Image (cartoon, rainbow, N blue to C red):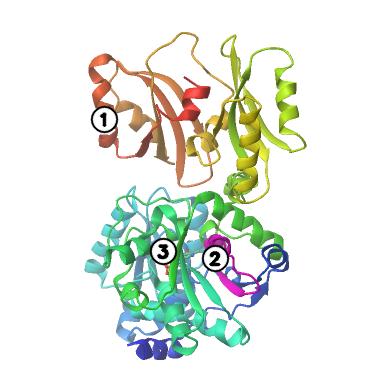
Amino acid sequence: MLEDTVKKILQARVYEAAHETPISPAPFLSRRLNNQILIKREDLQPVYSFKVRGAYNKMAMLSEEQKAKGVIAASAGNHAQGLALSAKKLGVKAVIVMPRITPDIKVQAVRARGAKVVLRGDAFSEALAHALELIEEHGYTYIPPFDDIDVVAGQGTVGMEILRQQTGRLDAIFVPVGGGGLIAGVAAYVKYLRPEVKVIGVEAEDSACLKAALDAGERVVLDQVGVFAEGVAVAQIGEVPFSIARDLIDDVITVNTDEMCAAVKDIFEDTRAVSETSGALSLAGLKKYIQQTGAEGETLLCINSGANTNFDRLQHIAERTELGEQREAILAVTIPERPGSFKKFCRTIGKRMVTEFNYRYADPEDAHIFVGVQVKPGGDDRAELIRKLREAGYPVEDLTDNELAKLHIRHLGGGRPKEHFEEQVYRFEFPERPGALMNFLTHLPADWNISLFHYRNHGAAYGRVLVGMQVPNGDRGHVEEYFDRIGYRYWKETDNAAYRLFMA
Ligand SMILES: Cc1ncc(COP(=O)(O)O)c(C=O)c1O
């Protein structure tokens, strides 16, 4: 079976549309992390991601009759662009169905490559359903993004190039995982020829469908999927990729949003390439591997799988980078509300750089301050700082890993109600489309009072919203029944320490 896959990879037709991409050394990172770190540059493909390899190979294998009828896919991402380019090269008609909320920049990119774009539905599932209808009607051939042996074989050419280009020492290859097409192809090729080279999958912790499948011993469907790394936001690992990869890969590492953002910066600093978050995912996993194993002097390679990011997203990525590097501690510290006490607090902090500071008068006794402080990477320095503050008599709450604190509270300069009232606070992910807020509001009973509302655009498909509500007594036990009907993801935050200290 492994040999069959390797043969398919060797025979894959990709170079009529894709480039053989170089491996870049990462000298800054290598020095910093005491290992030789290499980056396979799939961001340099003509569509800025590796996805063109699988799409082209699959399409090149179609019969003349299939090609004459045309191909179709439902995708707003890198697969759409890979497919559009492949179709153009092969002279095949391509139809791409995208949800109506797809940013115009992506629609234009696909149209510019000559594909026909059909906008349909609000969610991906509706776009997919429409694609299936069009297949019935016109006899198009569906080109899957990952769950297909010819797609896997096309992606496997990344592994083939890596072994050809890096003939010397190679200890491990880190591969980003969405539906598993890339890792299945890479693992098959690498394990067949150099089984001693570790192949390690890296997933975003809120879309870790491969890890879930390996833990369960079978493919499972995740209840919810985080969309921060759009390229890998997949709820279930593909059947074909899983059957190939499950026994070949050495490990799966999961990373969080901040770790991905930090890796985007690392790649930029060593290569000047701006990768998308999914593109930098594998580097985030590589760094975690070094942290967990204490590896030194090894040669470790990660795949920068793509660079299709919205420009306005970069601000958010930059903001979260310090945290991902664990170079910033976010703390809530209570100091006495009297002259001179802030100065005394700063003296306790010492020479460390204060990166953020938020405070608003609330009562005559205590002042709760929201403070960001630069610390050395790893958790030890932060722990030492907190110990020092507590020793000096300050109550400290560590908010460094607190999503509410990092997404919203840091941008709110107070807003505490004068008098005490019962308030329920929820954080939501709203789809970024017109009418999303009205839809939310019209689902709430008219006698609920909105007492807090904070929104921040991150240039992503989803907007983050913090809402406080005064809910009449009779409804208090049932608020989430209303939210479930709306269908947006939400988190109850009424008991969150950051909210209690700064807003309640
Ligand atoms: C940039 C990027 N990285 C990684 C992946 C994951 O690939 P796969 O679905 O084959 O696991 C994708 C998938 O679209 C992607 O666009």
| Residue occupied by mark 3 | 178
**Residue at coordinates 40% horizontally, 91% vertically from top-left?**
7
In this rendering, the label closer to the viewer, 2 or 3? 2
Residue 367's place in the image compared with 43, above or below, is above
Q: Is residue 261 left or right of residue 185?
A: right
* Secondary element at tag 2: helix
Mark 3 or mark 2, which is nearer the start of the sequence?
3
> In which quarter of the view is residue 393 placed?
top right
Instruction: State the mark number for residue 482.
Output: 1
| Residue occupied by mark 2 | 293
Q: Residues within 10 Å of mark 1 (few under 14, many from 20)?
A: some
Label 1 and label 2: CA atoms lie apart by 46 Å
Seen from the viewer's position, the closer of residues 236 and 373 is 373
Q: Amino acid at mark 3?
A: Gly
Q: Is residue 453 left or right of residue 293?
A: left
Q: Is residue 322 magenta?
A: no
Where residue 49 appears, as percent x and y from the top left, is 53, 68
Q: Residues within 10 Å of mark 3 (few under 14, many from 20)?
A: many
Q: Is residue 296 magenta?
A: yes
Q: Would the CB of label 3 be found within 8 Å of ligand 1?
A: yes
Label 3 and label 1: CA atoms lie apart by 32 Å
Which quarter of the frame holds ligand 1?
Answer: bottom left
* Secondary element at tag 1: helix
Q: Amino acid at mark 1?
A: Tyr
Mark 2 or mark 1, which is nearer the start of the sequence?
2
Where residue 237 appears, as percent x and y from the top left, is 33, 65
